[in-house]
Structure formats: structure tokens, C-alpha cells
Amino acid sequence: MSETITGSLNVSNDVIADIAGYAAMSCYGVVGMAEQLQGAESVRLSSGQRLRKGVLVSTAEDGLTVDLHVVIEAGVNMRSVSQNLASSVTFTLQEIAQIDPSKLKIAIHIDAMKSRA
């Protein structure tokens, strides 16, 4: 038996970043999240506990933007992985954080490619 509770739900950007990072890591073709290094033109593959490092969440009046900086597996179809990634993150944020998909923009940044070996 479920009961409807009136009120509003406020979720911090850090929690949204964690959820988005978790959803991204579960996608086929994603090797990890890319951490931007200050003053360098290279990226570092973040460990599993630091999923938030590759995610930037920003809010505006028209909604929420989630920028995902990912490292993908060499040899995979970038377009397919990107579409799957955006779909998975959107679905997960809708299910867990109750974010309206029409007010959500997902931006995928493929920062590097790496073999899984």
C-alpha cells in the first residue's frame, strides 16, 4: 500500500552528480569518469569512489544541465555509447531524484579512449 505525501523534494547538485556518475559507469562502453586536471591538457581516470569528479551539474531557470566527462572503451561506437549514456542517466535521475526529463539536458564529453585490458 503506497501513500502519497505532499511537499517538495530538494536534491543537492552533489547527490545528482553521484547518481549521474553511477548511472554512467553502468553503461556499456564507459571505462570511467574523466577528472579534469588544472592547467593540463590531459585527463585522469577517476577511481570508482570518485564518480562525481567527472560530472558537472548546473542549474538554471529552465532546468538542469549535467555535463559528463567520460573515458570510453577503444573501438566502441561513440554515437551509440553517447546515446545510451544520455538515456541511462536521464532515466536514473528521473527514477531516483524525480527530475523531470523535459527540464534536463545531458551533455556528453568524451575526454579519452582506453582499452579495457
Image: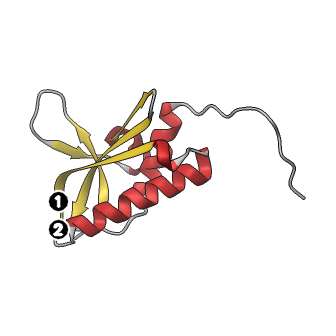
* Outermost residue to the left: 41
Q: Which residue is mark 2?
A: 74
Contact check, label 2 and label 1, Cβ < 8 Å? yes
Q: Quadrant of residue 80?
A: bottom left
Residue 109 appears left or right of 63: left
Q: In this figure, which colouring scheme has been used for the structure?
A: secondary structure
Residue at 39 percent across and 38 percent down: it is: 65
- Observer-nearest residue: 29 or 49? 29
Q: Is residue 30 visible?
A: no
Residue at 45 percent across and 40 percent down: it is: 17
Residue 107 appears left or right of 11: left
- Observer-nearest residue: 91 or 70? 91
Q: Amino acid at mark 1?
A: Met
Say if 114 sits above or below 93 in the image. below
Q: Amino acid at mark 2?
A: Ala
Kindly state the secondary structure of the residue where label 1 is placed: strand
- Observer-nearest residue: 95 or 72? 95
Q: Which residue is mark 1?
A: 113
Say if 43 sits above or below 61 in the image. below
